[in-house]
Image: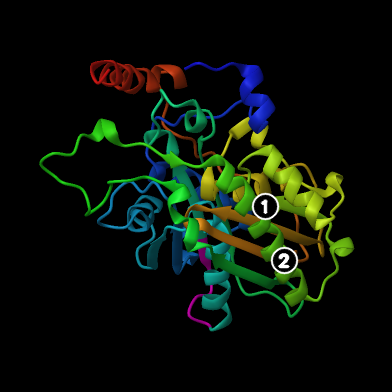
Amino acid sequence: MDTSDEWIVERTGIRQRRVSHVGSGELGVVAGHRALAAAGKQPADVDTIVFVTTSPELLIPSTASLVQKRLGIADAAAMDMNVGCSGFLYGLALANGLLGTGVSKCLLLIAAERLTWYLDWTLRDTAVLFGDGSGAVIMEPGGPDEGLLGVDLGNDAAAAEALLVPNFGTVMNRVEHDMLELTVQFDGREIFKRAVKGMVKSGLTALSQAGIDLDAVELMIPHQANKRIIDMAGHKLGIDPAKVYINVDRYGNTSAASIPIALSEAMDNQRIKPGDAVLFTAFGAGLSRGGAVFRWGPRAERLGESDQELPPGNASGLEIIRPHADAMIARAAAQG
C-alpha cells in the first residue's frame, strides 16, 4: 500500500494490531475460559451465552453454539448478536434484562472479531484500521447500586451505508460472486462526524439515567476505533483525559471486542476499584451507538487465572495476509 507508519499514526493513533490465524469462535473460547477463571466459575455454572460479533465463524449455526460446545457447557441458551462496534454495550443491556428478570442467573458475554478476514489489503483507508481479538465477562445479579445503572442505545440508519460489507449474505449471486470482491466500504469523514455525536449523546443520556455527574466517573472506556475520535468525544463530553482508557495504539479497531479487551487491561492495571463508576461509549456499523454507566461491585481482582491459549500459529501476521493481498493486487491489475 501507498502508506507509512507516520501516515497511519497521525490519522488513527494505531501502531500495532493482531492478525488471527484462527476463527472468531476459537478466539472467544479462550476469552471465555479466562473470564470463567477470573470469576471463579465453572462452565456448568453458565446458563446463557451471548456471542457478539460481525465476523462469525458460520452463519448457521450460531457461533455461540460452537463456543458452548468447545467450552463443555452441556445445556445453555446461546445466541449471536451483530451490532458492529457497539455490540458489547448492546450485549450488556441484553444481559441486564435477562438477569433482572431471572431468565438467566450466570451469563457469559463474549465479543470476538476476526475483521482482517474482510479486508482488501490494497485499500489503506480500511486495511490499516482493523485488528482481531476477543474479550469476555461473566455477569450475575448484583446489589441495588451495582451493575448497569444507565444505558442508552440507538442507531443512525440514515448513514447505514457509511460502513458496509456489500454483497455478502443472501443478496449474493452464488453463481457470479467473486469472494475477492469482499471488502469493507468505509466513509471515514461521515463516520467521524456521526461517531463523535452519537457517543456523546449516548454517554450523556446514560449518565442522566444513572443520576451520576461526569465528575463522579472514575474511568471512561470508549470503543477503540481511532484516537482522534476518542479524543474528540472525550473533549465534547468534558471528561478529564486522564480518566479515558486508550489502547487503540496496540490493537487497532477490534470492533465489538475493543471495550472488553480494554476493560480487562484496565483491571490488570488496577484502574478500576470497588464501587467505581465506569462510563462506556461506542458507535459502530448501522450506524449503531451506545452508552452505559456501570457501578463496579465489591471485588475488582481476579479470583483465578486460566492457562488456556490459542493453538500455536506457524506464520506471522504479514505471512497470513500475504496470499490474500497478492490475489487482490493481481485482480486489481487485471482490471486495469
Q: Is residue 251 left or right of residue 158?
A: right
Q: Dot 2 corresponds to which residue?
A: 293
Q: Is residue 209 left or right of residue 327?
A: right
Task: Please report the bounds of the magenta region as a residue range.
Answer: 102-108
Q: Residue at x 45, y 68 (%)?
A: 48
Give the position of the C terminus as an image quadrant.
top left
Residue 57 vertical position relative to residue 292 in the rendered view, above or below:
above
Residue 113 pos. (x, y %): 46, 44
Taking the view exactly as shown, the residue that stands out farthest to the left is 175
The image quadrant that residue 20 belongs to is top left
Residue 123 vertical position relative to residue 274 in the rendered view, above or below:
above
Q: Residue at x 84, y 45 (%)?
A: 241
Which circle, 2 or 1, is nearer the viewer?
1
Residue 200 pos. (x, y %): 71, 59
**Amino acid type shown at disc 2:** Val
Residue contact between numbered discs 2 and 1, judged by CB atoms under 8 Å = no
Q: How many marks?
A: 2
- Secondary structure state at the residue bearing disc 2: strand
Q: Dot 1 corresponds to which residue?
A: 196
